[in-house]
Image (tube, rainbow, N blue to C red):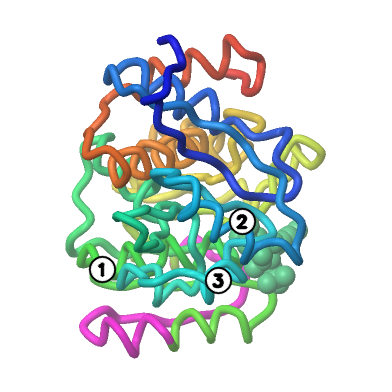
Amino acid sequence: MEITGKTKVACLLGHPVSHSFSPYIQNYMAKKCDEDLKYVCFDVEEDRVSQAVDAIRALHIIGANVTIPHKVNVIPYLDELDKNAAIIGAVNTIKNENGKLIGYNTDGKGFIKSIRDAGHEIAGKRVMLLGAGGACRSIAVEFAAEGAASIEIRNHTQAKGEAIVKSISEHFPQVQSRYGTFEITQDELEGVDILVNTTPVGMSKDKESCPIDENIVPPHHLIVADIVYNPHETKLLKWAKQHELDVIYGIAMLINQGVEGFGIWTGHEVNAYEEIKTLLVHKGVISDH
Ligand code: ATR
């Protein structure tokens, strides 16, 4: 679509941004939905965050994504926070509503969409999360908000698991939450419905590693998800597939956090996961094996 005086702009604020896949994802959806909208990336240094946020207002940018290292330090400059973003304490999406900037976090929402799109319910599920970083926090809060029965966080650093459990039990007292050590036994997995790796274990430079003992024979009902998307099929997912379990690939969360953000800005509910995945494979930014 031709750029004219009416073309709207959405953007990414981060540092660095040159490696971002978001322009492919967002500009693809804009074109598909016939939106006169262009998505660009801005490299914003740490001491320029308040100016960058003000520029969203001044330039009537319709919305922004926020990435490392600004997801937390952008918050003081916004006008309002979505409830779950406030609990998570980090923002990856901003909506400009006539100059009022509202912060959202679509990382966990995108993850939940990936599970739903694979045909699974969230309500009543017993969830185990490996790792206790920012990604774990956003996924844990959305699982709790969507009615998971229990959430168990397993991590090396106990204090980080404890902090997430504390905020889940404060805001979602109906959800049973607990934390424990990183190592998991076969017996413990019997009581889990959805297992999610939120650690970097299994990423390309460490692709032979698996966050759980591969000798474990999992229960048939277990759904296994990995947020690592490079390689596409991690050791954890290979283990799950070997036992014929349903798996959720890391690329699904990456695409769906963008789909959710686009929906917040434009109101469009885009169903184009396979198309976007094919585009990313074609652009060489991800592999499909
Ligand atoms: P993000 O904020 O993107 O989720 P992060 O803050 O680096 O990433 O969090 C990654 C999580 O994976 C952390 O909880 C980390 O464990 P610690 O809290 O003990 O630091 C966990 N993690 C990282 N490398 C790991 C490894 N090799 N084995 C197990 N856990 C690991």
Q: Horizontally, is 160 left or right of 258 in the view?
A: right
Q: What span is colored magenta in the figure?
A: 167-187
**Placement of the C terminus among the 4 image quadrants:** top right
Q: Identify which amino acid the numbered label 2 is placed on.
A: Ala
Q: Which residue is mark 3?
A: 154
Q: Which residue is mark 2?
A: 52
User: Which secondary structure, mark 2?
Assistant: helix
Cα gap from disc 2 to disc 3, whole angstroms = 37 Å
Q: Position of residue 148 (x, y in %)?
A: 25, 66
Q: Few, some or many C-alpha atoms within 10 Å of disc 2 (few <14, some 14-19, many ≥20)?
A: some
Q: Residue furthest right?
A: 205
Q: Identify which amino acid the numbered label 3 is placed on.
A: Arg
Answer above or below: position of 75 versus 212. below
Name the one closer to the observer, 40 or 59.
Answer: 59
Q: Position of residue 105 (x, y in %)?
A: 42, 59
Q: Few, some or many C-alpha atoms within 10 Å of disc 1 (few <14, some 14-19, many ≥20)?
A: some
Looking at the image, tell me whether mark 3 or mark 1 is earlier in sequence order.
1
Answer above or below: position of 37 versus 85. above
Q: Quadrant of residue 243?
A: top left
Answer above or below: position of 232 versus 88. above
Q: Which residue is mark 1?
A: 145
Q: Quadrant of residue 247?
A: top left
Cα gap from disc 2 to disc 1, whole angstroms = 31 Å
Please identify, in this view, whether the residue under mark 2 or under mark 3 is nearer the observer. 2
